[in-house]
Amino acid sequence: MAMAVALILIVVASVLFHFFSPWWATPLASNWRQMDDTLTITLIITGIFFVVINLFIVYILLRFRHREGRQAAYKPENHKLERWLIIATSVAIMGLLAPGLFVYAAYVTVPANARDVEVIGQQWQWRFRYPGPSGKLGRSSVALISAANPFGLDPADPAGQDNILINNNELHLQVDQPVRMLLRSLDVLHDFYAPPFRARMNMVPGMITSFWFTPNKIGRYEVLCAQLCGVGHAGMRGYVVVEDAASYQKWLKAQPTFAQSMAPPPAAIVDVAAGAAVAAAGDVLALQGKALSESKACVACHTVDGTPRVGPTWKGLYGKTETMENGATALVDEAYLKAFIRDPQARVVKGFAPMMPKIEMSDAELAALVAYIKSIGAAPAAAPKQQAQQ
Amino acid sequence: MAYTDDSAHHDHLPQGFFRKYVWSQDHKVIAIQYASVAILAGLVGVGLSNLMRLQLGFPGKFAFIDAPHYYQFMTMHGMIMVIYLLTALFLGGFGNYLIPLMVGARDMVFPYLNMLSFWVYLVSVIVLMASFFVPGGPTGAGWTLYPPQAILPGTPGYEWGIILMLVSLLIFIVAATMGGLNYVTTVLQARTEGMTLLRMPLTVWGIFVATILALLAFPALFVSGVMMLLDRTLGTSFFMPALVSMGQVSNYKGGSPLLFQHLFWFFGHPEVYIVALPAFGIVSDLISVHARKSIFGYRTMVWAILAIGVLSVVVWAHHMFVSGMNPYFGFFFATTTLIIAVPTAIKVYNWVLTLWNGDIHLSIPMLFALAFVSTFLIGGLTGLFLGNVSVDIPLSNTYFVVAHFHMVMGVSPLLVIFGAIYHWYPKITGRMLHDGLGKLHFWVTFLGTYAIFFPMHYLGILGMPRRYYAFEGYKFIPDSAQTMNAFITVIALFVATVQLTFIFNMVWSVFHGKRAGPNPWRAASLEWQTPETPPGHGNWGPHLPVVYRGAYTYSVPGAKEDFIAQNAPPVPGDAESRLPRDKEALA
Amino acid sequence: MNQAAILKSAGGGYGKPAADNPLERRYAAISVALWLFMAVASALFLLFIAAYIMRMDAADWSPLAMPWQLWLSSAILVFASVLLQLAVSAAGSHQIERARSLLLLAGACSITFLAAQLWGWQALQAIHVTASGNPAGSFFYLLTAMHALHVAGGLVGWGMAAAGSWRQEQRRLAWRIRLCARYWHFLLAVWLLLFAALGWLTPDFVRMVCGTR
């Protein structure tokens, strides 16, 4: 009776798998315990149906299998039984739906004390923006996006001046403080999802979507992009740091505001590592390149601190001899960089996936970008020589 | 393939090879043409899934499978399987073959249109496959083709692949409409004498309602496809908002990506029932024949098919709970989605109750039918998680969704397709499929697909996202998940390989299979009562059959045989006539 | 395959009128198929209009003034429907010659309709309304093109009826004209709906009807 055995095995294996597999929801780090509870209720009810119906079929197979002389009963209908089954099923369904709708009602009702945080998604990186003391986020528009203004904020809007800009992929939140995440996409659909928070929402260009939650566990959580957004979808990583009020405020105060980011001498906004080298060279072109690397999302895949990511790190790249997948080697100089950026699919660097997209830019922008990469390149001995070339 | 031994009939002037087998207007030939192309497309789809699994199981080990290729394989796999395999096979393959035979007609009412629909379908397949050979390759936008990304740089195939995909879909919709008009009109107009709607087998009901759904739902795909094509080629902004792409501000503005999603899913949800309803109908027939027992609650089963069909047009936005649409829609669509679970559950109960007190023959069709019930059970139950809006929020776009839709769309309807082919093969060819190979095929496919997709539910609950090329560097995903992925890949490759034994079986048995009589399963429904097997041109010989009863008259107490054919003239005073009036097979 | 052989002989038992005439059975089948196709096309156009309404909601919407040529083409389409309806009565009362002339004239009218639509397109092009500019423009071209395609498809059916009309077989001609007339009236209704939507449906009206915002 192989089929009966198989069904029993399936039931047993499935139940055992449920209890012994190492994969279950990440530990909850937000207020949405109700979602987990509703999942559990659903699991129990559906689990019961799963086990009972499968085992019932096993029983039927054993009892009513064909044997010599056996004849099936003739009973094409039983209205009473069917009515009972419809009612029982409807009750079970309502038992599942009702708690789910209650939880959802809470999900769509943002608490009055929720603080706003804006998440900006772009192929393939995250940025964040907080309102300043005024509590308002300034107007933004894709038409205003440029190398110097990667957030696309309107300088004419006073509400935007004190907005705090986080031009990297690490968001900080205060523990036990409800937040309303305002999601803004600059290009395609994305989704800001950190599984321990449970709550999430798609990001749709042309509109602002939102969801709310209260992080209630201190820690550092990984962010996924959870809506296919092109080849770099799997590389669009971010982090959320949940910390106590004091640490959070300290961190927040250290971040630049929009006003500061728009102010000239660039020395004020450049981050330490690249800034020191570049400021020393006094190279405005490289600074423009740095801004471009952010606005054109190169930093989504290329770090400047030495860690390889989706693409090779730019620290020490210039002047290095790079090895390709096919064993060939090449010296990373201006020509190499320009050729690679203009036609990324022509060669594959060993150890990396050939997923670099072709990013449109003018020759002037290309020159700036290359200058920037050069400025964080290899041996310092090379630097004065590059200086002379400029 | 099926007509190599069909030289016996001489209904009219002999036809040349091309007229008989290529430009044929005979529904049986057209059905086999549809099925052959669909199965070939399906083999390509399986191959693509294997390539995906190689990357998921052994990331980075296959240089050819880079991120752009992965997304292209993923997209083409999905679209081929849903549209070009399942929809075409159930409607164009099974629908074409079985409807005229089951309702007692000589052919479809519009044979010329029927023939055209196949050739247009073939053109749509060719256009789709051509996208592998154009610059930039096929589209990698995911089978759902969401804008804006589908037509922007950053997504593979945005140059030509997406254009060919959309054009192919538009052509397919034309073919599906032509075919659909045929199937519906035939059921309404060409039933033989005595064949009332409520005496039709559930296979016909399933395909009939699915076809009506297809006729009304495909326009939504057509609308969204045309508008996306214009956005891509003419620069219109139906779906394209103002955006910055790869550092460039685009010329688009004002369009709405959500508009596409509403249109797409208004088609997309009925689409899954277009695949599921024929499967439901067929499995009812398989179970009743092989358990020698009338389907339990025939009228309720018909009601359930109709209810599911009607409800399927008001549930679409359960695919959009986290899309950013108006949040209050979530209440409505969660409710309608859980309501549609009720008629679906009734069907599951009725299949089980048909088996109860039956005379269960564990033939290969029955094995596949039982496997369907078990896998559809778990697939349908996980739908309850996803339909309940707040439970869906953390599960959306994770492997839980992948597991769910593969169980209900991939595994269970596929098991029905296999069971149906084992069941009707003797009618189509006059021979039985090889039993030993069939058992091997069954066990590997059933247990293998279960092993592939069951664990994915848990990976999804963990939060593992779908449509990811690689998972390196995520601390919350343990190494054991990667090991699980490798294990799943190995099983998937094995299951895919064993499908070749099925293909071999189908071809080999045409020539060497055990010869079957006209009705080897001793079934009551009309298609088994043709004077010739395989059925000749015109199906019924000089006289159309007359039907006296429903399609499920099995095991009448006291009857000579354990089945009474639909067209067997009633004998006054026999066991059937002595049934109590309310228990009579529906007249 | 003989149509008659395929269609059921409606013997007793259904309460349907006995329709043993093969021609009547074929007509009934094609009639059912045409109703089905009209349902499919209705779904298509209603969905296009739904998309139009949803897109209208965006900030960049500015309605389009309908070129006067569309009034002309609408009148021509009405005239074509009228002609076809007259042809139906003519064929029904065995006035074959008259029916044929009306049928041919209706077809000529419909071709003129398409020409007038094209003229309307040219008028818009002349004032620089392109498909890719204003979304109202995009929808204008899209919806008129879709409707025109359906008219063109109908003209194929008309062509078959017209070609056969010289054979003087009254019943066949009568039902072909009847089917043409039905389809034409349907396309006229669709056109009037599209024309009204393109010309006069505004976001405010939509909001009033839907009670939103």
Image: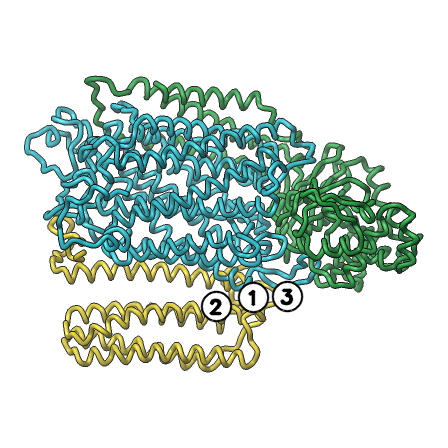
| Amino acid carrying mark 2 in the image | Leu
Q: Which residue is mark 3?
A: B251
Which chain does the green colour mark?
Answer: A
Q: Residues within 10 Å of mark 3 (few under 14, many from 20)?
A: some
- Say which residue appears at 38% left-offset and 34% top-offset: B415
On whether disc 2 and disc 3 are found on a single subunit, the reply is no
Chain letter of disc 1 in the image: B
Question: Which secondary structure, mark 3?
Answer: loop
Looking at the image, the residue that sits furthest to the front is: A328
Q: Residue at x 36, y 71 (%)?
A: C152
Tell me the kind of residue under disc 1: Thr
- The residue tagged 1 is B236
SS assignment at label 1: loop
Q: Subunit of mark 3? A: B
Residue C142's label in the rendered image is 2
Mark 3 is on which residue type? Asn
Chain colored cyan:
B
The answer to whether the residue labelled 2 contacts the one labelled 3, judged by CB atoms less than 8 Å apart, is no
